[in-house]
Amino acid sequence: MEVTVRYAETDQMGRAHHGVYVVWCELGRTSMMRERGVSYAEMERSGVLLPVTRLKVEYRAAAYYEETVRIETRVEAARSRSVRFAYEIIGPGERLLARARTDLACIDGEGRTRRIPDEVREALRAAAP
Amino acid sequence: MEVTVRYAETDQMGRAHHGVYVVWCELGRTSMMRERGVSYAEMERSGVLLPVTRLKVEYRAAAYYEETVRIETRVEAARSRSVRFAYEIIGPGERLLARARTDLACIDGEGRTRRIPDEVREALRAAAP
Amino acid sequence: MEVTVRYAETDQMGRAHHGVYVVWCELGRTSMMRERGVSYAEMERSGVLLPVTRLKVEYRAAAYYEETVRIETRVEAARSRSVRFAYEIIGPGERLLARARTDLACIDGEGRTRRIPDEVREALRAAAP
Amino acid sequence: MEVTVRYAETDQMGRAHHGVYVVWCELGRTSMMRERGVSYAEMERSGVLLPVTRLKVEYRAAAYYEETVRIETRVEAARSRSVRFAYEIIGPGERLLARARTDLACIDGEGRTRRIPDEVREALRAAAP
């Protein structure tokens, strides 16, 4: 999954604002799920939501406007009611820009925790190293 | 209605990104509606939506990080199925930063146009000059 | 130029927020300039800035999460100190989502208007219909 | 420091997007610094930058459109070249929405680490519990 840094994503320090990395992680995991046949859009329509419950980002180097950035996503743990993703954000010349990790919980439309549907968990597990 | 320019809203030109003004207009009109007793949050819960159908912004001067900006909103026309708001965005020293205008249509939860509820239209009309 | 609607770009109406279209237009024009050999990043480094002075968007239909949206950009007028771009934002099934227009002025690092460099204006003119 | 959840900050799950909390933390710390006489805007103009190097957010409950949210910020550690802030994001009825922590490094305009100016570090230390 690759993105190009948008002008609107820069801040006056002249770099991609650190909050944008959170959006990039979201792009990394939804695009990875889609590749494994899991559409997050469809999951939501069927009443299965995956809000982020924990987020950690370690910033190593800045990303600049118009640079192409690669988001490498892997599943670290796919449990029955939650899933943990890990990310590496890689800039030009294979420079590591950031490492990140998110925990997501599975809830239904009323906000109650529920099991991740089996086929989704299987797809996620297959994505774990 | 006043806002202070957030760091995340600046871009590498060192100013508030021009897209942010659109969010400021939204803040201007929802806060003005709230002052007139119309909660947009409640309207939406009762199935009355007001998406923007037309937007125009004329930028005059830049807004900078940590500056406090005032958004002056007025209703230009409150029709049965649409409403037009006009905005002036004023910076420090009463400097005019931008003028804007938005048209909003009234739709229901299924996306069909519908009449603006009478009490909302009355409240909006009272806000027209 | 194509973009996929990001989750972070949706709002609680379940659609891409209307402010996001402004960012998409920016992506459309910078990517179009890049294709014509003009890097906005390099222009800025050489002290040539192109802030937006006027913006107009006409929204026709909503864009939804994970939909791929095409931004068609053309130069409407390339003058000595300003340039006007026009955009069509096209959704799945060639549905027109929005039409937009932006005027940009050319300024230097101190904020004074200046002429658009000849090679940039030539490249922009070649992009006009 | 209080903010009201903006419509543009919601996502189609009907809550403030999790990335917005990162911006709220930034508002919390810059407003807290300002109260202690340290303007981040001025610091930057004098060539002292404080980029975020590490970020951690633990989400407990959702924030909804038009809700007023309080950001409580404290300095956990003010070292010679870095500073750690801790945040609690509190919703209506004193409900804890999130806890967060950020580490910031001090760099100069060329990106080299440098000492935090004494008067800034003193102001930050005074803010530690």
Image: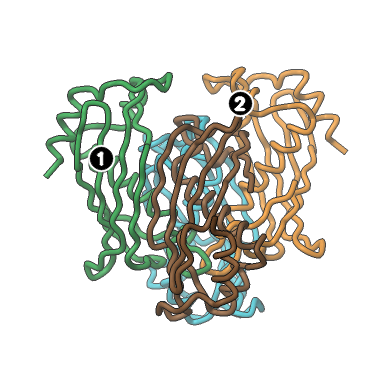
Chain colours: A orange, B green, C brown, D cyan
> Do the residues marked 1 and 2 share a common chain?
no
For mark 1, name the chain. Answer: B
Question: Quick check: A39 left or right of C125?
Answer: right
Q: What residue type is labelled 2?
A: Leu
Which residue is pictured at 71% across the width and 58% down the height?
A68
> Is residue D121 visible from the viewing direction of this image?
no
> Is residue B119 visible from the viewing direction of this image?
yes
Residue A3: where, in percent of width, then height?
69, 51
Q: What secondary structure is marked by label 1?
A: strand
Q: What secondary structure is marked by label 2?
A: loop
In depth, the one of A104 and D71 nearer the eye is A104
Which residue is pictured at 80% across the width and 27% down the height?
A123
Kindly report the distance in space between the C-alpha atoms of the residues bearing marks 1 and 2.
36 Å
Residue lying at the far front of the rendered structure: C129
In depth, the one of B50 and C72 nearer the eye is C72
Crowding around mark 2 (Cα neighbors within 10 Å: few <14, some 14 to 19, many 20+) is many
Residue C40: where, in percent of width, then height?
59, 67
Residue with the mark numbered 2:
A49
Q: Is residue D48 above or below residue B34?
A: below
Asked if marks 1 and 2 touch (Cβ < 8 Å), the reply is no
Q: What residue type is labelled 1?
A: Arg
Q: In this view, does A76 lie above or below B93?
A: above
Residue C2: where, in percent of width, then height?
64, 45
Residue with the mark numbered 1:
B84
Residue lying at the far right of the rendered structure: A129
Residue B52: where, in percent of width, then height?
37, 38
